[in-house]
Image (cartoon, rainbow, N blue to C red):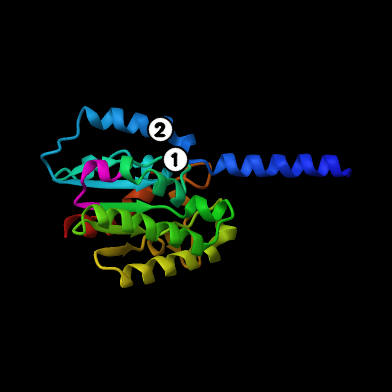
Amino acid sequence: MSVKNYLFLALLFWYSTAHAQDPKRFQGEVDAIHYHYDTIWDRTQETIVFTGSSSIRIWENLQDIFPNHQIVNSGFGGSEASDLLAYTDELVLKYNPQRVFIYEGDNDLYNGKSPGKVIRDTREIIKKIKQHNRETGIVLIAAKPSILRWNLKRKYKKLNRKFLRLSRKLDGVEFANIWDTMMAGRKVRPDLFVADGLHMNARGYQLWYPIIKKYVEH
């Protein structure tokens, strides 16, 4: 390969990687979330925000299953912790939440980031939320097992251990372990997923519900 071609491919790789990590790629989705909740969000009521990647975004019946609470679902599909950090003001703080549920890390590890990088970004998200209101409760939802990404299970389990340790170190931060309920012995349950092997079906969310409910209701 010529030096010229090598430099071109290196530049192309750098551009693609940088572009993929640019939080601005989600601006349209963030704007759509604002438009939706600007018409229904009641600022006089206490609010619980669920945010993070597609496992939150497609959990469409959150308000129905928690009818005694005002729920804002500001999940944005394909996001990583660094993206949520960039949009914390718009997707979390804007709604002055009493409690925040965060699901990030799933895409991060799949895209090559380390568990340590996810934790560093998560720490910054927590810092921003607590600076806004130190009384806001934060729940870190474990990265889930999935069929599609089962080859990365060791990294996901390592990340979840780090989430747990982080929650034990910081006041007002808790860890919701949804990993174990999705397992059948040493394998992830295949009946919990739609055809892509990554996103959950209704049965998967039914398993999440009693675990998440404990943190919603207390």
Note whether residue 15 is visible.
Answer: yes
Badge 2 is on which residue?
29
State yes or no: residue 159 in magenta. no
* Mark earlier in primary sequence (1, 2): 2
Label 2: which secondary element: helix
Please report contact status of discs 1 and 2: CB closer than 8 Å, yes or no: yes
Question: Could you tell me which quadrant the C terminus lies in?
Answer: bottom left
Residue 190 drawn at (x, y percent): 49, 53
Q: What amino acid is found at the position of numbered circle 1 in the picture?
A: Gly
User: Farthest residue toward the right?
Assistant: 2
Which is more foreground, mark 1 or mark 2? Answer: 2
Residue 216 drawn at (x, y percent): 21, 54
Identity of the residue drawn at 46% across and 55% down: 105
The label on residue 116 is none
Label 1: which secondary element: loop
Q: Nearer the viewer, residue 52 or 67?
A: 52
Question: Could you tell me which quadrant the N terminus lies in?
Answer: top right
Residues in magenta, as a range: 92-99
State yes or no: residue 93 in magenta. yes
Q: Nearer the viewer, residue 157 or 81?
A: 81
Q: What amino acid is found at the position of numbered circle 2 in the picture?
A: Glu
**Horizontal arrangement in the rendering, residue 105 relative to residue 38 (left or right):** right
Note whether residue 210 is visible.
Answer: no
Residue 121 drawn at (x, y percent): 43, 57
- In this rendering, the count of numbered labels is 2
Q: Nearer the viewer, residue 36 or 218?
A: 36
Identity of the residue drawn at 60% across and 59% down: 151
